[in-house]
Amino acid sequence: MAKKGNRIQVILECTEHKNSGQRGTSRYITTKNRKNTTERIELRKYNSILKKVTVHKEIK
């Protein structure tokens, strides 16, 4: 049975890695409150392939 509520799972993908043309992807899964945060979120997360902290944006 699905949970009721406003929290949903979202996938964050690295923007720098996608534009660099390198193989693979850097993605994180997190949750957000749909009611309080209606727009797509951006977080600074560590990219292990580029070995630095980059901006990750919500996809889907």
Image (cartoon, rainbow, N blue to C red):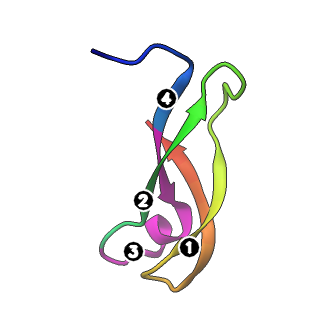
Residue flagged by tag 2: what amino acid is it? Arg
Q: Which residues are magenta?
A: 10-23
Residue occupying the point 49% across, 67% down = 19
Tag 3 residue: 21
* 19 magenta-colored: yes
User: How far apart in space, not on screen, are marks 1 and 2 (Cα)?
Assistant: 10 Å
Q: Of helix, strand and loop, which one carries label 2?
A: strand
Q: Is residue 58 above or below residue 52?
A: above
Residue flagged by tag 3: what amino acid is it? Gly
Report how many numbered discs are placed on residues in the image.
Answer: 4
Residue occupying the point 45% across, 36% down = 9
Tag 1 residue: 46
Crowding at dot 4, Cα within 10 Å, few <14 / some 14-19 / many 20+, comes out as few
Which mark, residue 8? 4
Residue flagged by tag 4: what amino acid is it? Ile
Q: Of helix, strand and loop, which one carries label 1?
A: strand
Tag 2 residue: 27
Residue occupying the point 33% across, 17% down = 2
Discs 4/2, front: 4
Residue flagged by tag 1: what amino acid is it? Tyr
